[in-house]
Amino acid sequence: MDNGEKRHGRPSMGVWSGLIVGAAALAGVVVLSAAQTPQDGQGRRDGPAAPRTAAAAAEVCEPGQNPGHSAARLAEPGAHDPSALTPAEAAELDQMLRRVPLHQSAPSAQQPQTIPVVVHVISSRTGTGDLGQATIDEQIAVMNKGFSGGYGGADTGFRFELREVTRTRNDTWFSGFPQREDTIKGQLRKGGPETLNLYIVNMDDGVLGRSTFPQNYADAPDRDGVVIDYRTVPGGGREKFDLGYTATHETGHWLGLFHTFQNGCDSPGDYVDDTPYEREQSAGCPEGRDTCSSAGEDPIHNFMNYSDDACLREFTEGQAQRMAQSWAAFRA
């Protein structure tokens, strides 16, 4: 297939009437790593992308260490995401989505879907990370604005409503969440596949957040949810990443989206037709960057990229469709 055209053989939203149900996969670790050095020094590759071999793919994107698949947003230049999806893992998740028959209408801008949110604030015994209610409310407002197109992108048809806040003061849980994730989620998680459980903790160095994919839910319901670093909330103090967009990014994974740079310049990219191919994740806000020979500059302003928060502003119509399909298939 010509990499200049993103066509993946999926039904259009006119054919999809609604769908979603989960199987097992960690979806969104927010790993804010800087983009790799462009081949010509200007952020553009002049020639077509070389086909990626299986060995090369395995070297660049190792399977996740947790059960299922995962993805991340990293904050440190050159940081490696050990849970990045390989091309084969992304294809497996896409096949799971395509196999689910749709039996109901999917969310849209005309018929929005409100998602109940349970926020789990995990802090130290001295109170570090114990966010106030106003900050939590602002985080939900930021998510609503991003998913409704309020920053300039598409209205995805998803809205978020805070239902409950739990608060836990525990030094071990606060600073050691990744090592105790199963235990913590097993004790705190509430609701079914339709409920977004948002865990706010002290993440490992370089990691801003992580999420499960909707395909994971059926096999690992207790692991379902989004995890973010407490400093990434609005005004949280994480340099370049404290406008609250890490939660928006990770919730995109929770609703079925891959990173915009999934598969690099190779087809089928991120499985969304209207996001241009992108060789690697962005860092900062590299206006005009164009790392693939196919049409379109890199989607550096897309919430599913790794640009600084101030650079992010949009989901596309194609991403809205994929999230709606995923919701109907695995979470409705």
Image (cartoon, grey):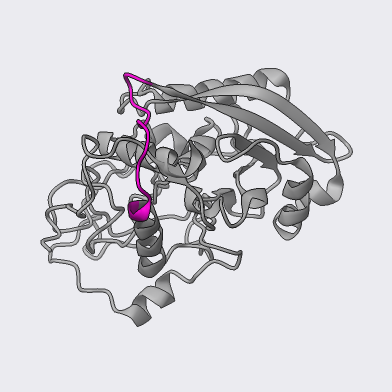
The overriding secondary structure of the stretch rendered in magenta is loop
Give x and y (percent) for residue 152: 31, 24
* Magenta residue check for 292: no
> Is residue 74 visible from the viewing direction of this image?
no
Q: Which residues are magenta?
A: 98-111
Residue 321 horizontal/vertical position (percent): 30, 37
286 vs 139, nearest the viewer? 139
Considering only vertical position in the picture, is 248 above or below 277? Answer: above
Compared across the picture, whether 205 is left or right of 302 comes to right
Quarter holding the N terminus? bottom left
316 relative position to 5: left or right? right
Q: Position of residue 217 (x, y in %)?
A: 56, 50
Q: Where residue 155 sits: x, y (%)? A: 33, 25
Which residue lies at the image location 21% right of the left edge and 51% below the top edge? 290
Measured along the vertical axis of the image, is residue 264 above or below residue 29? below
Q: Quadrant of residue 317?
A: top left
> At 19% from the left edge and 61% from the top edge, which residue is drawn?
45
